[in-house]
Image (spheres, helix red, strand yellow):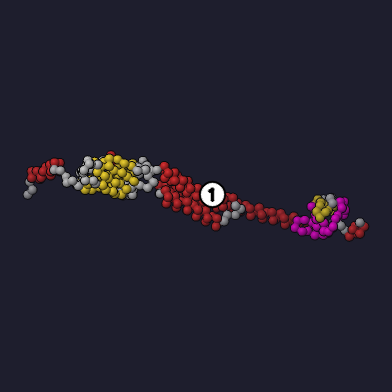
């Protein structure tokens, strides 16, 4: 049977050994994490540590890359102070001084390295964001133009608008990451769906109204054509000189007419011979022509 006093004695012996027995020269650990000013973890950062010792001591340096959570760990390093540098393309180098710790010691808040984007990379990132935003807006503009401005929407133009929109969102996700690309995609997609649905309804209503107007105009033209055909064979007077075109009066109606041939002076008697479209064709009676 295990005696409680024996267990307590063993635990005390272990704690005293950990506290007072020195670690081997290469049994220390350096750990920490790298993040942006917005407290976002930075992965694939090259972290280098170099032992800061007196002249004549054995040099020590090592390099590691951070994981996706921005963490780095150097194991089996000498005990002492180290110069630490962090490098990543597009980011300003960061440097600090850290000390190695015993294995099992919790990570300290001071072990966090903050890196900032270089001004040039920040400018290029903003330009990329602006460029992809313009592409997305151009795709939306194509959809608006197709459904609201052209007389009749085209399926091909609508597809082109969606493709341009998808291209802009895809480039945004690739160049700026999901943090920027995903909201842009959600907002752009929602706007495109709204434009497409509302635009389709608006275009359908507009086309229906235009078709109705065309039909009404056709009915009016047919009625006018039938009325004009009732004038064929009737005589009237030239209100103006007819040099190909002019004005005539047939009964109580004053109409724009066209001379069948030649020139017809004003106040001459004319006869409607036929109708072309909605224009009466007139000529002088044969007896008046001989008398002239």
Image x and y of residue 92, in percent = 37, 43
- Look at the image and tell me whether residue 267 can be seen: yes
Residue toward you, 259 or 208: 259
SS at circle 1: helix
- Residue 63 is inside the magenta segment: no
> Who's the residue at 77% across and 59% down the image?
276
Q: Main secondary structure of the magenta part?
A: strand
Residue 289 located left or right of residue 82? right
**Residue that lies at the very extreme toward the front in this rendered image:** 56
Q: Which residue in the structure is indicated by mark 1?
A: 141
Q: Is residue 263 above or below residue 84?
A: below
Residue toward you, 150 or 221: 150
Write down the quadrant of residue 54 in the picture: top left
Span highlighted in magenta in the image: 256-282
Image x and y of residue 41, in percent = 34, 45
- Look at the image and tell me whether residue 104 can be seen: no
> Who's the residue at 54% across and 51% down the image?
142
């Amino acid at each position: 049977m295990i005696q409680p006093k024996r267990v307590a004695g063993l635990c005390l012996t272990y704690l005293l050994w950990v506290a007072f027995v020195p670690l081997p020269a290469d049994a220390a650990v350096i750990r920490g994490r790298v993040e942006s000013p917005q407290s976002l973890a930075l992965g694939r950062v090259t972290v280098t540590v170099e032992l800061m010792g007196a002249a004549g001591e054995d040099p020590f340096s090592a390099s590691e890359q951070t994981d996706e959570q921005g963490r780095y760990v150097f194991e089996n390093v000498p005990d002492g102070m180290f110069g630490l540098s962090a490098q990543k393309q597009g980011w300003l180098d960061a440097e600090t001084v850290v000390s190695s710790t015993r294995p099992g010691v919790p990570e300290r808040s001071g072990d966090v390295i903050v890196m900032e984007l270089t001004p040039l990379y920040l400018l290029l990132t903003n330009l990329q964001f602006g460029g992809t935003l313009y592409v997305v807006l151009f795709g939306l503009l194509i959809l608006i133009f197709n459904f609201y401005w052209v007389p009749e929407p085209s399926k091909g133009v609508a597809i082109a608008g969606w493709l341009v929109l998808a291209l802009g969102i895809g480039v945004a996700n690739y160049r700026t990451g999901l943090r920027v690309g995903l909201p842009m995609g959600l907002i752009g997609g929602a706007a495109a769906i709204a434009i497409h649905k509302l635009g389709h309804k608006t275009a359908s209503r507009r086309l229906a109204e235009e078709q109705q107007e065309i039909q009404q105009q056709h009915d009016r033209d047919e009625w006018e054509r039938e009325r004009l055909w009732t004038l064929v064979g009737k005589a009237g007077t030239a209100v103006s000189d007819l040099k190909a075109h002019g004005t005539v009066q047939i009964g109580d109606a004053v109409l724009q007419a066209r001379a069948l041939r030649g020139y017809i002076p004003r106040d001459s008697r004319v006869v409607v011979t036929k109708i072309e479209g909605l224009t009466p064709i007139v000529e002088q009676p044969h007896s008046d022509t001989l008398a002239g």
